[in-house]
Image (spheres, helix red, strand yellow):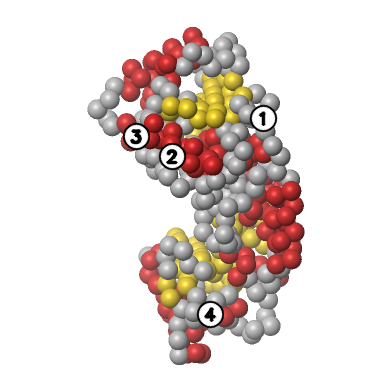
Amino acid sequence: MNISTKYFYQNYQRYFAQVADDIKEITIKEITELGAYNIQEAYRGLHFHSSQEDLYKINYHSRFINRVLAPLIIFDCHSDKYLYKTARDINWDDFLNESRTFAVFATTTNSNIKHSQYAALRLKDAIVDYFRDKTNSRPSIDTREPDLWVNLYIDNNRATISIDTSGGSLHRRGYRRHGGDAPMNETLAASIIEYSEWDGTKELYDPFCGSGTFLAEAYLYATQTPPSILRQKFGFEKLPDYNPFAWSEIKEAGIKNIKPIPDGLISGSDISTKVVKAANYNCSFIDHNDAITIEQKDIFEIESLNDKIIICNPPYGIRMGKELDLSLFYKNLGDFLKQKCTNSTAFIYFGEREFIKNIGLKPSWKRPLHNGALDGRLVKIELY
């Protein structure tokens, strides 16, 4: 590939956002507001067009996307030899040098190259050999915190090699320094807050706050804080057409747009003192004014939660141990909601949906939402 040749994303301003299938609807709305257009749904993601500035904005402000890929080349790929040969022709020093690190992650489906790990290895070999031939040296592999993430996707022998413009999954906001047992994915927590239609006018409470993910995501939303404000680096900074001035302006505008919230708007509790300490510590990285209130309390000792939006992910087998009688726990939770939560609306995520019936209250709706391998359900329960 000639050094003056533009890459696919430059020619077409076309990108791919990796998004959970459950939350594509709200992600389309979000990225449209951030400047994306010509959005098309695909397997585990969305194709979209955007300007360079809006690409930066989407990475900085998206609450739901895992990562955004910038395609370099798209080509027919019927063998590992052709994959290697084609990848060797890319000018990898546009993105990397021998003193930097990189990682390759790959997915293959319905193709002659059957194994994703082998496909990733062949692309890795091509990048390493490109530098070795040119400089007699090579960049190192770092699968945890590389300087450059390279993505390979092969479907029906059609390959796309992309750069991850996010520089690793955007769900890692940076505030969760201490996690509890089976913590909720941050993008899932953000999507649950979105589906609750909470607008920041009614008090929000999480009685099973764990490591504080719901509270932190609610705070980011209510204060209009960019979700990736703590992120130290983005993959788009490694692109050959990176514009540091545009990125600086987007960051400054995002920080300037942050607004304060009243004390007591977002609060929560948990039965474990250790977990409450972790939640307070995590939230302190984004909430510098101590607006979020978290205390140690058993939910069944709370006097009342009237006139609130209750959002929670109650304990389930993975978190509490299968030996506990969770059916009784959920019955007691249903009784608490009925008796002590007048004029509130509860949005409860059931990691194990068979317990929905034990709560003894009729949901207004149920929505399937995966949390990793858990095929969970979010339910809305209106309390009078």
Establish if 165 lies above or below 194: below
Instruction: Identify which amino acid the numbered label 4 is placed on.
Output: Asn
Residue type beneath disc 3: Arg
Q: Is residue 234 left or right of residue 330?
A: right
Give the mark, 3 or 2, whose residue is nearer the N terminus. Answer: 2
Q: Secondary structure at mark 1?
A: loop
Are the residues at dot 3 and dot 1 in contact (C-beta closer than 8 Å)?
no
With 358 as the anchor, is 72 left or right in this view?
Answer: right
Residue 97, numbered circle:
4
Pointer 1: what residue?
A: 262
- Label 4 – label 2 distance at C-alpha: 39 Å
**Quarter of image, res 356:** top left
Q: Residues within 10 Å of mark 4 (few under 14, many from 20)?
A: some
Labels 3 and 1: the sequence-earlier one: 1
Percent coordinates x, y for residue 176 in the rendering:
48, 46
135 shown above or below 80: below
Q: Position of residue 193 (x, y in %)?
A: 58, 34
